[in-house]
Image (cartoon, helix red, strand yellow):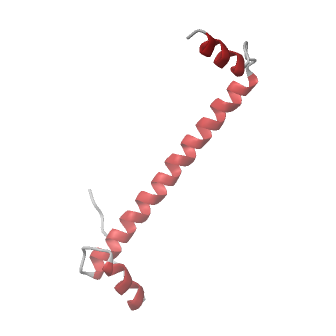
Amino acid sequence: MVMYMRTNIELDDELMAQAARFSASRSKRGLVHEALALYVAVKSEEQRRATYRERLESVRASLSRRQRRTDARDLVRSDRDSR
């Protein structure tokens, strides 16, 4: 169920004109709706990236606590020498 909220706001005419140049929407209502949808999309993506970043840092911290059995350079050398 989609709910709509009626509201009256004052919008900067120059800012609306600038935004309209980038939008296919030709009504103020459509332009505001598009701007809100874009805002939600951007913030959702930021949140998704932050969550990913936290998980990545957790994995890196876990890996750094583990002791490596072989130095990475030794692994590269052994791989190179086996060819």
Residue at 38%, 90% (x, y): give it. 13
The quarter of the displayed image where residue 76 is located: top right
Residue at 36%, 79% (x, y): give it. 19
- Residue 42: percent from left, percent from top: 45, 59
Q: Tell me: residue 65, above or below residue 29.
A: above
How many marks are shown on the rendered structure? Answer: 0
Return the residue found at the far top: 82
The quarter of the displayed image where residue 40 is located: bottom left
Q: Tell me: residue 53, above or below residue 59.
A: below
Closer-to-camera residue (33/18): 18
Residue 63 is left or right of residue 45, and the answer is: right
Residue 49 is left or right of residue 73, and the answer is: left
Residue at 46%, 54% (x, y): give it. 44
- Residue 73: percent from left, percent from top: 71, 21
Residue 68 is left or right of residue 7, and the answer is: right
Return the residue found at the far bottom: 13
Q: Tell me: residue 30, above or below residue 15.
A: above
Closer-to-camera residue (33/66): 66
Q: Mark yes or no: residue 80 visible.
A: yes
Residue at 25%, 81% (x, y): give it. 27
The quarter of the displayed image where residue 31 is located: bottom left
Q: Quadrant of the C terminus?
A: top right
Residue 15 is left or right of residue 52, and the answer is: left
- Residue 12: percent from left, percent from top: 42, 89
Q: Mark yes or no: residue 8 visible.
A: no
Q: Quadrant of the N terminus?
A: bottom left
